[in-house]
Image (tube, grey):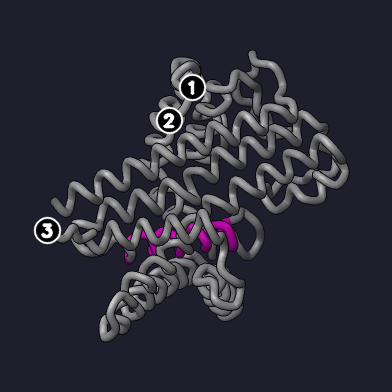
Amino acid sequence: MTLTIPEGLAVFLLAAAFDILIGEPPVRIHPVVWIGRLISSLRSLARPSMMQGILLAVIVIAVSVLSAHLLVEGARAFPVLPLLVGAYLLKSTFAIRCLLETSSSIGRMVDQDIEEAKKMLPALVGRETGSLSPAQASSAVIESLSENYVDSILTPIFYYVLLSPLGLGLEAAMAFKAISTMDSMIGYKKPGLKELGFAGARLDDLANWIPARMSLILIALARPGGARDAIRGAWKYHRATPSPNSGWPMAAAAGSLKIRLEKPDQYVLLEENPEPGTGDILRATALMQSAIALTMLTAIILLFLYSS
């Protein structure tokens, strides 16, 4: 008897292997870079209005979803190629290796050369880094690591698994990545962007709403000894951040690790705990690795059950 792996599960396993073993593809052929170029082109043509922003969002999502669908369907003329194309596109929606490696590299640099670490931090965070203390720099890395666990890993996988029974898993993951890319590029409350980026930013909040709250469970399970503190911390402090979603994974991580996280002049999470040191970045990375492993395992089990 021959065991066949269902297409949805096979695509997911290939995408995960690509991410973990190889990492990000070259910029010139990276699907997210293409989405970013589309957003930039449309932004240059659009007026700063809410209606133009909605139209931009519709076009970006539609083009991203339709392109992914047509690429996979066009590859069906050749054996195995649809799996490879699907895996390549799905991998572009999450970034496990990149997130962990970047966080670890900056964490080591905070310990070795704080000034150099401040120059590297913009790869992870959008805040001003020049005046950060070592503790604040460590906090910034841990905040970004836990927040991006949701946005860059959990959410695209969530939508892939959720809609795979309908044969739309890849399209759903690509739609989310289009939304997330819009939010990161134009979802700011700045002149010229506040109206144009409104639709993308609100869609990003909506898309991440369920996964952000699911992250509390996964982070708690990732370190059972800190599960109670993770749940208490997230429940108490999740509203402290301006975002309706980022407070959940950040406060859960802070509670699990028993540290204080702070974005100067913005928010403080678990203020009763000590400030983080550079060693806490390693602990946070290990925590997120475990949460990611649980996420991947859960996805694999569900995809397998769908096909049974």
Gap between marks 3 and 1 measured at Cα:
46 Å
Q: Position of residue 22 (x, y in %)?
A: 55, 61
Disc 3 marks a residue whose amino acid type is: Met
x 42%, y 68%: residue: 89
Disc 1 marks a residue whose amino acid type is: Ala
Q: Along the horizontal axis of the image, is 79 left or right of 248?
A: left
Contact, mark 1 vs mark 2 (Cβ under 8 Å): yes
* Residue with the mark numbered 3: 1
Q: Is residue 306 above or below residue 267?
A: below
> Of 14 and 171, which appears nearest the observer?
14
Q: Is residue 29 above or below residue 304?
A: below
For mark 3, give the secondary structure: loop
Dominant SS in magenta = helix
x 50%, y 58%: residue: 19
Which segment did they paint magenta?
Answer: 171-187
* Residue with the mark numbered 2: 216
On whether residue 58 falls in the magenta region, the answer is no
Disc 2 marks a residue whose amino acid type is: Leu
Which label lies toward us, 2 or 3? 3
